[in-house]
Structures are given as structure tokens and as C-alpha cells.
Image (cartoon, grey):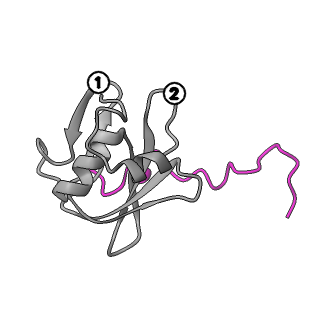
Amino acid sequence: MTSSLDSNLDPVLAARLKRDDHGLVAAIVQDAGSDQVLMLGWMDDEALHRTLTTGRVTFWSRSRQEYWRKGDTSGHVQHVRSVALDCDGDALLVRVEQVGPACHTGTRSCFEAGGDLGAVVGAGSGATS
């Protein structure tokens, strides 16, 4: 992982990012056609720079401590259509054209594999509608 000082990322954009203690920003990946949320990954400045300049989504793997470009081994490529920074500067929305499943489990979205927690929201909290 590179620091913001070592990255080729535009310094104006880099200054707007609010990174976590590890120098990372959450990157929410959404299908540009259907608006379905596909996955969440992590980017440092260099991963964002590679994503913006190559048109393919690149993440920083926290577990492997290396860059990985979505689809290089699986063929399930994410072609970047747009990237937006949220109002706080601490999250990115990456809209993509997804080829094949986005999740490593083989599902279209990583949020299909986790299941819907809607029935749990507010349970036991005393919340009323």
C-alpha cells in the first residue's frame, strides 16, 4: 500500500479523501444499469488512481496486503462507468458494468449471500413506528 505522498492520485482529489487509520477509503460498488449494490472493497490513493486511469476497479486487499484488480483471476471484470466521493470524503461510489458475478461466492451481489436482516432491524430496541 502506498501513502498519499507516494501516489500518482491528483493531489486535489487526495486532499478531499478522509482515510481510516490504515489509509483506506470504503468503495461501494454499484451496477450502473440496475443500481444494485454489488460489493464493498477498500481503496488507498494508489488503488483509486489505478481505478480512475485504467477503467477497471482496483482494490487494496487488507488480508493479503496487496493490490488486486477485480476479475483478473475470475474473469468477473468491473468496467468503471463513474466514481463519486460522498459529502464527507470517507466513501466512494463506484458505478460499474459488471461481467459475471461480483461476489467471490458466485452470486451477483455480495449482499445476496449475507441474507436480508430486515426482520432484525429494531428488534428488541423498543423502537416503534
Q: Is residue 63 left or right of residue 73?
A: right
Q: Residues within 10 Å of mark 1 (few under 14, many from 20)?
A: few
For disc 1, the marked residue is 65
Q: Is residue 49 left or right of residue 41?
A: left
- Quadrant of the image occupied by residue 81: bottom left
Question: What element does badge 1 sit on?
Answer: loop
Dividing the picture into quarters, in which one does residue 61 lie? top left
Please provide percent x and percent y for residue 35: 41, 71
Q: Which residues are magenta?
A: 105-129
Residue at (58% x, 59% y) in the render? 87
Kindly report the distance in space between the C-alpha atoms of the residues bearing marks 2 and 1. Answer: 15 Å
- On whether residue 122 falls in the magenta region, the answer is yes
Q: Amino acid at mark 1?
A: Gln
Residue drawn at point x = 52 percent, y = 58 percent: 86
Q: Nearer the viewer, residue 104 or 69?
A: 69
Q: Is residue 4 left or right of residue 46?
A: right
Q: Residue furthest top?
A: 64
Please tell me which residue is depicted at 45% across the width and 42% down the height of the picture: 25
Q: Position of residue 116 (x, y in %)?
A: 54, 53
For the point 30% across and 47% down, the residue is 9
Residue at numbered disc 2:
21
**Secondary structure beneath disc 2?**
loop
Q: Is residue 85 left or right of residue 8?
A: right
Q: Which mark is residue 115?
A: none
Mark 2: few, some, or many residues within 10 Å (few <14, many ≥20)? few
Q: How many marks?
A: 2
Secondary structure character of the magenta stretch overall: loop
Q: Amino acid at mark 2?
A: Asp
Q: Nearer the viewer, residue 28 or 84?
A: 84
